Each structure stands twice: as structure tokens, then as C-alpha cells.
């Protein structure tokens, strides 16, 4: 095991693992309580929030209501949304948008100074608060990074990758982190730990997420004994640019909200045949349709020429730049698209205050599973959920520990180093893992593919020693095992061998490490699993 030493002689009040929107917003809401943020990358970088193009869903107009927003959210959630959680999230949305305005986020305004709102898929009214069309995520992160840098009670420690939770039984006592580019690990003891480590996108071969979204937080919590909820529900964005880039650039849903249509290479508008809402159907419906067109060889393209046309560069600068970089002019030609892993509805089980099943551990953002999204997330609810529950965590910690200590930290070397080079075996294992997840746990799943994938993950894990890589494998096992256990199709989880929604499964799923490992053993010992591992050996040239 890699050596570890204390990063400091004292115990922090709060350590937040993650420098994205969740971590920064929570730290700001905790001020002036001293907080340490641990981030593998410079804060604001490597965060999926910074890449969010749509905006934040919030019922802030006179024509809208929190009840209407809640109804839209639950209609998309496949019957698994926690109604109490959804209602408090939508009711607190306006206050959190005002918080962000207070931190300097330049949301789009009309000539009368009111928030300018747009519409996205499955929303019944315009309620998406945006920045310059498709720049909300970047603008929000820039404003919060600036606010955090100016807040003396927040210590930012960059270049440290969280790998394990320190715990005594069910009591979490800190974070064990490895300095990027080094093998040594440091212990960051704390009275409260907040997981804000992001999602799992980079565990799949095609994703819109940054490389830092690789499931570390779920594995850390699972290994410490936490309950993981709804891990099988993965959302695939239907319109990532199909240009071979990793990560895949995103063609924002807002384009379809503005009237862009999906066509095949002959110009046929295929969504007309699939759903009354056409391009504005829920994401899982559109993703499967795009996947089917791609698989058939007819291709899938987002046609913005008529709906947006010459206004594209000004209204959607981020997407426009990505298209031009790929040699596509969206003003004059359709954009080739394909589904890509975009968001994980599952994660570490939390309550309304962000508390997990372990003492002194909170979680929010994509690493958490609050029950707000159910089986399928409504567009632009992710940033909303993040700020709502980050704020609730801050309030809960303040109430639990009313007397903060004085902010004083000894110096620590957080000069960011180049990452250590993974050895050839580890690099190959990660590539094989991502391809296996895309093939077996992707848009369309079945028992044979899921069983084989579990066995393959187990075989790949045996090749790797580094904790961070084994964490990736652990999270993949949790997602795959949960998908195998849910023998129906619902929301973001589609089983070709169980294509119907089954009322017997109209409940959230919960797993522990013991449950996951039992599923792995069964898969490894099955005929399907053995055959999958044999194919893996041939593919990777392993003759053992």
C-alpha cells in the first residue's frame, strides 16, 4: 500500500473533495467557516459544470411555478423521482439563481432587466436561465472561482487526487489524497467531509465529460461502506458531435429548443415517427432514436440551417467553435451527431440535506443520488440540483457544528505537477474498460452484455495496482451490476431483453459493496463471463 502521512497536525472543520460547481458553491455558502477544497486540477478546470451549455432550470417568470417545474421533472423521471426532494429543489431554485447573480454570474437579461429564459426538451414553458446562449457553465464557474479566490476562509489545495475516505467503522474522519505526479499520499483529517467529485463520464468510450469525471467519489464511498443508489441510470446525450474527438463536443439541447431538427442522411426527419414531442422528447427517447439511425447506417444529423442559420455564431458560440474545429459549418450544413455518456442519475445515496449513509460524510452534485432525477434527468436540472443541495449541506454543517475554528493552515506544497505516466498495462486496461462499458452498458443493454462486462472489469482490475484506477473499476462494477439487477426498461436504463417497464421495479435501487461483489463473482463464474474474459485475452494479447 502507498505510504501516507498527515497533511497537517490539526483537524479541519470541513474538507470538500472537488473543485467544480458543487465544491465551490458549498465552500462559499459555508463562509466564513474555514474550509479546505481538494482538487486534482486547478479549481474550475476539469469540472463538468464548466462544460454545461444549457443553463439552470428555474421557475422565475410570472407564467411559471415551482409546482409546474416539479411536475415536468417527475414526468421525465420514470416514476422514480422522490417527490419531496423534487419539490424542495424547484421551490428553492429562485433563491439559488439570485445567489449566483450575487456572485457575479452574468445571466442573459432582456431590455427591461428581467432574466431571459429559453426552453429545452420536456419543459412545458421557457424556464432555462442562460448566459450568451450556450456559455452558462463556463460563466458560472468563472464567477465562483473569482469569488472563492477572494474568500480568506477558503483554502484551495490543487493538484491532489482523493483516493480513499479515512474512516473508523461508519464514522468518516477525513480524506486520503495523492499528489498528482507523485506516489506519496497525504491524510487530510476533518470533522466533516463533502464529496463533490463529479460524475462517471470518462468511464465510457464516448462522453461529453472531462477526463476528471471518472467515478472516484462513488468508489471511495462504496469502499468505506456507503450505500449507492440508482447506479444503473445513465443519461446519454443524444447530440454529441460525431467527429471522433475525446471528449465529444456537445451540440446543446438548446439548439433543438430553438427549432433545430434531427434528420438522417437523406433528409428524413426521423423523430416525427417516434414521439409526439419530436426533437423535444425526453433525452432517453431521442438518444435511442439517434443510436438506431447511426447503427442502421443512415446516420443522424442536427439540422440548424433554417431554425438558427446565420445567427448561429452569435447565439451559440461554443457549439459553433466546436463545429468549425471539426471542419463543419453549421450555418450551411447539418451537424453529424451520436449519443454520448453525459450524466449519471445514480450515485452516493443522500437525504434532503446531503447526508450519506455514513456519519460525517455529505455528498452533492453528480456524485450524489438525491432522488431528484429518478430514472431520467430533465434538461438543465443538474446545475440546479447542484447549487440547491450544496447550499443545504452548508446549512446542515453549520447547524451541526455551530462554533467554527479559526482559519489557520500550515503551508503545503500544492504546485501542480504533471501527472504520473501510467504504465502500459494500466493504459491498456483503461482503454479496454471504456470500450467495454460503451458496448455492454451503453444506450441499449442486455443480460449477456452486462454479465460479460462485469467479468471483463474483474479481469482488468486484477491487472492494475494503482488505487485511482482500481476506483474506476469499482464504480464500473457498481453501475453494471445495478443494470443487471434491474430486469426492465425505465428512463435512462434500456434493456433489449426486458423492453417493457415493469411495475414490480417501480422503486429506487440500492447496493453496497457486498452486493456488487456478489454480482461480480456470479458473472465471473458464468459461461458468458468466461467467454467474455477469453475474448478479452485475445484482444489484449494476454496469453496467460
Image (cartoon, rainbow, N blue to C red):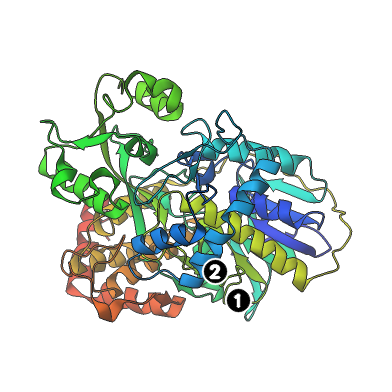
Q: State which quarter of the image contains the C terminus.
A: bottom left
Q: Residues within 10 Å of mark 1 (few under 14, many from 20)?
A: some
Q: Quadrant of residue 437?
A: bottom left
Residue contact between numbered discs 1 and 2, judged by CB atoms under 8 Å? yes
- Element on which disc 1 rests: loop
90 left or right, relative to 174: left
Q: Quadrant of residue 306?
A: top left
Q: Which label is found at residue 358? A: 1
Residue 140, x across and y down, in percent: 60, 40
Residue 378, x across and y down, in percent: 40, 55
Judge whether residue 186 can be spotted in this image: no
Q: Is residue 198 above or below residue 253?
A: below
Residue 296, x across and y down, in percent: 11, 44
Q: Counting residues from the N terminus, which is met first, the one under dot 1 or under dot 2?
A: 2
Q: Which label is found at residue 337? A: none
283 left or right, relative to 515: left
Q: CA distance from mark 1 to mark 2?
A: 9 Å
Q: Is residue 352 above or below residue 436?
A: below
Which residue occupies 21% across, 45% down? Answer: 290
Q: Which label is found at residue 221? A: 2
Instruction: Report the front residue among 169 and 292.
Output: 292
Amino acid at each position: 500500500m502507498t505510504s501516507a502521512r498527515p497533511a497537517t497536525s490539526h483537524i479541519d472543520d470541513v474538507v470538500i473533495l472537488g473543485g467544480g460547481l458543487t465544491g465551490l458553491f458549498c465552500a462559499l455558502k459555508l463562509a466564513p467557516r474555514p474550509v479546505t477544497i481538494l482538487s486534482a486540477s486547478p479549481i474550475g478546470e476539469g469540472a463538468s459544470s464548466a462544460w454545461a451549455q444549457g443553463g439552470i432550470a428555474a421557475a422565475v417568470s410570472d407564467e411559471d411555478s415551482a409546482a409546474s417545474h416539479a411536475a415536468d421533472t417527475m414526468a421525465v423521471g420514470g416514476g422514480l423521482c422522490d417527490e419531496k426532494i423534487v419539490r424542495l429543489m424547484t421551490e428553492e431554485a429562485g433563491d439559488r439563481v439570485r445567489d449566483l447573480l450575487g456572485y457575479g454570474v452574468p445571466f442573459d437579461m432582456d431590455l427591461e432587466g428581467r432574466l431571459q429564459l429559453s426552453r429545452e426538451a420536456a419543459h412545458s414553458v421557457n424556464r432555462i436561465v442562460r448566459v450568451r446562449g450556450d456559455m452558462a457553465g463556463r460563466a458560472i464557474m468563472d464567477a465562483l472561482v473569482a469569488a472563492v479566490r477572494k474568500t480568506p476562509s477558503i483554502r484551495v489545495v490543487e493538484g491532489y487526487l482523493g483516493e480513499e475516505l479515512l474512516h473508523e467503522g461508519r464514522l468518516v474522519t477525513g480524506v486520503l489524497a495523492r499528489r498528482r505526479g507523485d506516489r506519496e499520499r497525504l491524510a487530510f483529517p476533518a470533522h466533516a467531509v463533502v464529496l463533490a467529485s463529479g460524475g462517471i463520464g470518462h468511464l465510457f468510450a464516448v462522453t461529453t465529460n472531462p477526463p476528471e469525471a471518472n467515478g472516484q467519489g462513488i468508489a471511495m464511498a462504496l469502499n468505506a461502506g456507503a450505500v449507492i443508489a440508482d447506479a444503473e441510470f445513465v443519461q446519454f446525450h443524444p447530440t454529441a458531435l460525431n467527429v471522433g474527438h475525446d471528449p465529444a463536443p456537445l451540440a446543446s439541447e438548446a439548439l433543438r429548443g430553438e427549432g433545430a431538427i434531427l434528420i438522417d442522411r437523406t433528409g428524413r426527419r426521423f423523430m416525427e415517427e417516434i414521439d409526439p414531442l419530436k426533437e423535444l422528447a425526453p433525452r432517453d427517447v431521442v438518444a435511442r432514436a439517434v443510436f438506431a439511425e447511426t447503427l442502421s447506417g443512415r446516420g443522424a444529423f442536427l439540422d440548424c440551417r433554417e431554425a438558427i442559420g446565420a445567427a448561429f455564431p452569435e447565439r451559440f458560440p461554443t457549439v459553433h467553435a466546436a463545429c468549425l474545429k471539426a471542419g463543419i459549418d453549421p450555418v450551411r450544413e447539418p451537424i453529424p451527431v451520436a449519443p454520448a455518456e453525459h450524466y449519471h442519475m445514480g450515485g452516493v445515496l443522500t437525504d434532503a440535506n446531503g447526508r450519506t449513509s455514513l456519519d460525517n460524510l455529505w455528498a452533492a452534485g453528480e456524485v450524489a443520488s438525491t432522488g431528484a432525477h429518478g430514472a431520467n434527468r430533465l434538461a438543465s436540472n443538474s446545475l440546479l440540483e447542484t447549487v440547491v443541495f450544496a447550499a443545504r449541506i452548508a446549512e446542515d454543517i453549520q447547524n451541526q457544528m455551530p462554533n467554527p475554528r479559526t482559519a489557520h493552515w500550515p503551508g503545503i506544497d500544492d504546485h501542480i505537477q504533471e501527472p504520473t505516466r501510467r504504465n502500459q498495462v494500466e493504459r491498456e486496461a483503461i482503454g479496454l474498460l471504456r470500450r467495454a462499458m460503451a458496448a455492454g452498458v451503453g444506450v441499449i443493454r442486455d443480460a449477456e452484455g452486462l454479465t460479460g462486462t462485469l467479468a471483463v472489469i474483474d479481469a482488468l482490475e486484477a491487472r492494475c495496482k494503482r488505487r485511482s484506477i482500481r476506483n474506476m473499476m469499482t464504480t464500473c462494477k457498481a453501475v453494471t451490476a445495478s443494470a443487471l439487477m434491474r430486469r426492465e426498461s425505465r428512463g435512462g436504463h434500456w434493456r433489449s431483453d426486458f423492453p417493457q417497464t415493469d411495475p414490480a421495479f417501480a422503486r429506487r435501487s440500492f447496493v453496497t459493496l457486498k452486493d456488487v461483489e456478489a454480482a461480480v463473482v456470479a458473472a465471473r463464474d458464468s459461461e458468458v463471463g468466461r467467454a467474455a474474459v477469453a475474448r478479452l485475452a485475445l484482444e489484449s494479447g494476454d496469453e496467460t
